[in-house]
Image (cartoon, rainbow, N blue to C red):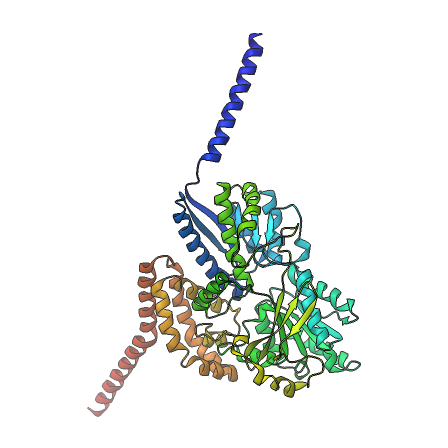
Amino acid sequence: MNIRFYIIFATCLFTISVGSAVAQTEDQPLEGTVQVGALIPITGGGSNHGQDVRVTLDLAEKEINQYLQEQEASWKFELIIEDTQTSPVLALESIEAIKAHGVDLVIGPYSSAELRNVMGYATSNDMLLISYASMATTLAIPGDNIFRFVPDASHHAPVNARIFEEMGITHVIPIWRGDAWGDDMAENTKKDFEMNGGTFHDGIRYNPEAIEFSSEIALLSDQVEKLSETVDRNKIGILLLTFSEGVHIAQYTYQYENLFGLEWVGIDTLVNVGGEKSDRISSEFYDSQISISLLSPPENPTYDMISEHVFEMSGRQPIIYSISAYEAAWVLALSIYAANSTDSNLVAAAMQGVLEERDGALGKIVLNEAGDLASSNYVIWQLKNNKWIHTGNYTSETDIITWNDNAFGMMGMVDGDEMASSVDDKINDTDIMDNTKEGGGCLIATAAFGSELAPQIQSLRQVRSDILQTNTGTSFMEWFNTFYYSFSPEIADLERESSEIRWLVRTAITPAVHILGIMSIADPDSEISVVVLGTITILTIAGLYVILPVLVAWVIQSRLYSTHKLLRG
């Protein structure tokens, strides 16, 4: 009797204690710093998007903390940013590092290949992920804690197919990045194009790690040549599914005359082609023969504000992925606030209410059963005279493209240069994508090292990105850009025209690139750190390129004078 009483008493006491502890946890506000991970390709194949994502996430972090301060919250929002370089292996290492900090909430990763490689680890460790760019349909899995604030490829692929069809293309040869995203987008485009009677050829699948494409482009040229024997060239189109290496690919396609004059269709990863500061070879090749499709940007003040901010910081108009990352940060922060917890399951549950109430930079976010953006419309841009021109809109609900008057390459229009030049008078300023702000890239170094993907260029971009995080750095870069871009385009052109000049410039600037690495240890959040290390860097470069040559010249002159004096005496 007594034993039974003590057992019942102990059970009740334990239940009350646990219930009290749970209640206390639920009522007790979060305190200190709440960390959220962010997987971004600041360098590597997706760096043209990743750098803009970094800018929008920094903005979101600042705004979120202002909001929390207004709400008198007792916690601060902080991002742990990891550079994945668009590498599935590095993405897994990065998410493991984030988990080691005790963080279960992550923005990213960028690509579907990265997401495929980390989702098993994330699921087994009860983590919540919001990807801002992954589209592979094979990763659309209902019931998991992995969300994507973009539609999957089954929504984007029909746009590619419709563009080809309306240009009168009946045969498509694809060249695509051989990863989860590229394979999925190519397969979905093939399905949609063949559904209406088109022929989709085997094409060329290239290694995502490749930085040299001579053999792939030679094979593409051979396929076009062989197909031209039985098919009118005006009926042949090229589907180009790449990340930022699309610029580098054009440097090889430029060598094959039979690849000119075809209709090329790509996607938003090619927006870094075009503009006064872009690579001249790729711009000239793609000009008047390529169309790209992008997720349609929303029309709201928040989106406009972010676009202006990104353009001010990077010199580029942002595409939708950086906006999706911004929204992911806000949705996670508001969900943490609503759940009063960083537990991934509680945050996921709170997200539903947050999404129903929030009308942010993407407008109302509606997710499907797989946790992906349910649908979206698309815009079509074409490169003309080195500028991207908005030429059409695709509506997902109707599967119809509505072309603007300034579109070229459509069926029934004149072919070739006459067709392209006929739109000159129809282009309005509001239709032009402005990617020409000074500061968009390092022209001399890119020409010297041969590719935007070269590690030296990625290192320079990282230094520039860190410098721009401070007011002092931003002011310096504004002055520097005005000076640098007054002469760099001419030097870059000379490099492209002469391998000897390119070698000479590369040899001359390599020490400066290594010296600039000093800035990598600067704290981007510290004005003093940037100023001190920046001063040291500038003085070191000045010493190497100005003071040292002057001293050497003085010593040589002194010795020559002494020798001359001895000979005379």
- Percent of width and height locating residue 161: 71, 69
Residue beneath the point at 31% across and 75% down: 548
Residue beneath the point at 66% across and 53% down: 140
Q: Which part of the image, by quadrant, shows the N terminus?
A: top right
- Percent of width and height locating residue 522: 37, 59
- Percent of width and height locating residue 120: 62, 47
- Percent of width and height locating residue 228: 76, 81
Q: Nearer the viewer, residue 12 or 449?
A: 12
Q: Residue furthest top?
A: 1
Q: Quadrant of residue 6?
A: top right
Q: Measured along the vertical axis of the image, is residue 365 above or below residue 353?
A: below
- Taking the image as shown, residue 557 lies to the left or right of residue 489, namely left
Q: Measured along the vertical axis of the image, is residue 121 above or below residue 236?
A: above
- The answer, for residue 460, to whether it is visible in the render is no
Q: Nearer the viewer, residue 17 or 539?
A: 17
Residue beneath the point at 72% across and 63% down: 187
Q: Residue furthest left?
A: 569
Q: Nearer the viewer, residue 505 or 161?
A: 161
